[in-house]
Image (tube, helix red, strand yellow):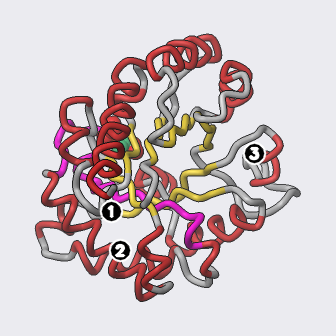
Amino acid sequence: MRKKIVAANWKMNMLQVEAAEFVRDLLQELGDQTAAEVVIVPPFTAIPRVVEALGGAEHVKVGAQNMYWERSGAYTGEISAAMLRNLFVRYVVLGHSERRQLFGETDEMVNRKVHAAQDATLRPIVCVGETLKQRDAGQVEEVLEGQLRRGLAGLETKAFTETVIAYEPVWAIGTGRNATPAQAQEAHAFIRSVLRELADDATAARIRIQYGGSVKPDNARALMSQPDIDGALVGGASLEARSFAQIVLAAAEDALDEERLSS
Ligand code: PEP
């Protein structure tokens, strides 16, 4: 069974004090739930404060929103995988649609970052997803397959299982317009079929695929109960500890239900 994974993508929000307050409130809201894996993805500047506020709480991990593929050198403004590992970061979000659209990231760049992250034992969360124009033109599968094939090119089997995919339809990000559970499930099932071709059946069955795009406490459970949806990448609703915790708890309840059904 795949452990659900719910990540809070804070984007360019949260000063240090706010970040520490969020962690304190989140830990209180979550109590001792361990059924779902939780990742906080702060801006670089708040990472040390989040790690400190977590105080070694093993059930909540820290991620970064981006990184560069080189190890070190004359790359002004960039951050390497080793620098993130040095701050106790475990995950890194790569190829978010905002990076693709606003900062010109290509699948080839995402691929270089995926390899560099894996080499440094950082687990990539690789974002894929179509625009509304592409959906309306009937190109969803073509777009997703291309992003996956190019973005994950050259990965070994073990590296695949340590990679998380986030399906984030661009038209659903920050718009309040989420994909229906059926639309999301259809895309997730397709992504898993591509992963089967890129790796193998057993590996594809172990890879976690998050849904992202206007996930809120009131739609989380319906999304999370779909068979190929293994968690959420949450933007707007992750800026408030209470609403993010409710999404995590929805994932945890779903995981516990699945466990009951299979025992
Ligand atoms: C995101 O940016 O990854 C995201 C899913 O944002 P939101 O939840 O605000 O749509």
What's the amino acid at mark 1? Gly
User: Which residues make up the magenta segment?
Assistant: 160-179
* Residue receiving disc 2: 192
Q: Residue furthest right?
A: 73
Q: Residue furthest front?
A: 263
Tell me if residue 118 is in the magenta stretch.
Answer: no
* Residue receiving disc 3: 84
Marks 1/2: CA distance?
14 Å
What's the amino acid at mark 3? Leu
Q: Is residue 215 left or right of residue 68?
A: left
Mark with earlier residue (1, 3):
3
What's the amino acid at mark 2? Arg
User: Quick check: marks 2 and 3 in contact, CB under 8 Å?
Assistant: no
Residue drawn where x is 42% and y is 61% of the image: 1
Displayed quadrant of residue 88: top right
* Residue receiving disc 1: 129
Q: Residues within 10 Å of mark 1 (few under 14, many from 20)?
A: many
Q: Is residue 36 left or right of residue 121?
A: left
Mark with earlier residue (1, 2):
1
Q: Report the disc number at residue 203.
A: none
Residue 243: x, y in percent? 34, 23
